[in-house]
Every structure is written in structure tokens, then in C-alpha cells.
Amino acid sequence: MGNKDNLNNEKKYNYKIVFSYDGSEYYGYAKQPNKLTVQGELEKNLSLILGEEVLLNASGRTDKGVHALNQVANFYLKKKITSIGRVLNSINKMVLKSLYIKSIEKVDPSFHARINAKSKTYEYLFNNKEYNPLLRNYELYIKNIDTEKIKEIKDVFIGTHSFMNFTSKKEDESNFIRTIYDIKLVKRRNGFKLVFIGNGFMRYQIRKIVGTIFAYCENKITKEEIIRYLNKLNRDIIPYQIDAKGLYLKMVKY
């Protein structure tokens, strides 16, 4: 994030914030010059309300188009918030309607939303029935997918692996190791969803994994080839990646 050391001698009060957002309204979570982002919108308005600069440490960044049901961040202040209820009411009036702050609470100074996260749960919603234009930003429409083949291949990704070839991440290249605890295939009324539970996910990682799963369903790649991508010691990024529509950060556990 670049803000992980926002605690200093002057800022002694630490606050945890939980919020949700419609990712189709933003150019992703992380601040970008001259772009509307979740972090930018929150920091700007919190700074105005609280009268000092607010810098957020989020549990992780979400890509453009990815939604969040329970994103978590923390920020440090010099002065104690005297009425959290008033701040919560004010911030929800000021931010765009595509963003909603659920709670703010004072926490231990050592708490860090990213570093202290134990697991993250993402859900990918898919519609394989009839296309619904009203939900085009909130579920991904996919035709003729064999869910039995999804069951065959999804568990290949479970466990601790180097996902260097399933991310576009460039920074911290020595740390591509992530653990996926479970991948669940769950039926929905108009399709299905894939639920990912892991200790953390890198940029595009879930989108590339699901793109690869679908490529396997379409006989574009074999199980053996997928395993080779997981075991490669050199960068050779998998060519499959799907759209962010339908992907949600559901929960962060501490």
C-alpha cells in the first residue's frame, strides 16, 4: 500500500473502518492521479470531517470493477474522535452513494488492516442462464460452462503455492507464495458462484485462476499444464484472465 507505517509519535489514536462499495463506479480501490478511487474518495472526505490528514491502510487493493461487501482499513489520528456516530453519519452523507461506511471503531495502536488479516473471502458470481442487462456489472454472464469440470480442476489451486504465474504483480517479486484454504462451487438461482478463501490474493490472481479453470472446461489447457504453471520457477504468466464483473470481497477475518 505504501501507507503501512502511518503510525508515528504524533498520531496515537488508531481507528478501524469497515465499508462496502460498488466497484463499477471506481478505477479500483487504490488512489490514482486524476481518477475516482475508493481510497481517494474516503481519505478526502474523512480528512475534511476530522480536520487532519487521513491515510488509509486497507486489508488489500481491489481491481477496477471489483466490489466489496466488507472491506476493512485502519487509520491513525492525532486527536481522539469524540463522537464516532456523528462522524459515521457525516461521512455517509458526503461520499458517493456507491460507497457506504458500515462502522468506525477505536482499536489498539498495533492493529493493521493488512498485516493482521488472517484470511480473506472472495465470491465470484456467474450467470449461465438468461443474460440480465440490469446485472451486467454485478455478475459475469458465461454460456455453456461444464460445472462438473470445474469440480474436477478447482482443487488443484488449493494449498500453498507460488502464484507468480497467476498474477501481474511486479513489486515484491520474492514473495509470490500464497495459501488458498478452500475453493467452493455453490449453486445460485440463475447460475453458480465460486468462493475463494485464502490468506491473501495478489493483483488479478483470482481472475487468472478462474480464467484458467474456464479454459480447462473448454479444453484449452490440461490439468498437467496447469500444474506445470504452478510449479514453474520462472515467470511465465498464464494467458487466461476473466473480467472483474461479478467479483466481490466478502469478508476479512482477524
Image: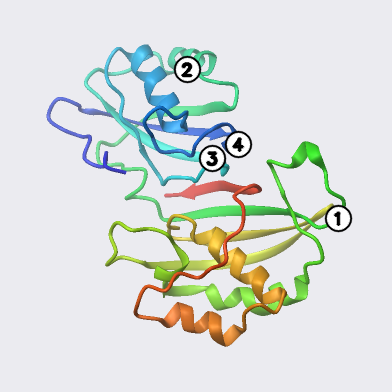
Q: Nearer the viewer, residue 43 or 245?
A: 245
Picture quadrant of residue 217:
bottom right
Query: On residue 91, which mark appears?
Result: 2
Q: Is residue 82 visible?
A: no
Q: How crowded is the residue under tag 3: few (<14 C-alpha within 10 Å), some, or many (20+)?
A: many
- Is there a contact, CB below 8 Å, between mark 4 and mark 2? no
Query: Is tag 3's residue or tag 2's residue first in the polypeptide sequence?
Result: 3
* Distance of label 3 from label 2 (alpha carbons): 17 Å
* Amino acid, disc 4: Ser
Q: Which residue is mark 1?
A: 129
* Distance of label 1 from label 4 (alpha carbons): 22 Å
Task: Please determine whether, in this image, residue 6 is positioned above or below residue 93.
Answer: below
Query: On residue 24, which mark appears?
Result: 4
* Amino acid, disc 3: Asn
Q: Which residue is mark 3?
A: 70
**Secondary structure under the numbered disc 1 in the rendered image:** loop
* Amino acid, disc 1: Lys
Q: Quadrant of the N terminus?
A: top left
Task: Please determine whether, in this image, residue 12 is positioned above or below residue 149.
Answer: above
Q: Which numbered disc, 3 or 4, marks the residue closer to the eye?
A: 4
**Secondary structure under the numbered disc 3 in the rendered image:** strand
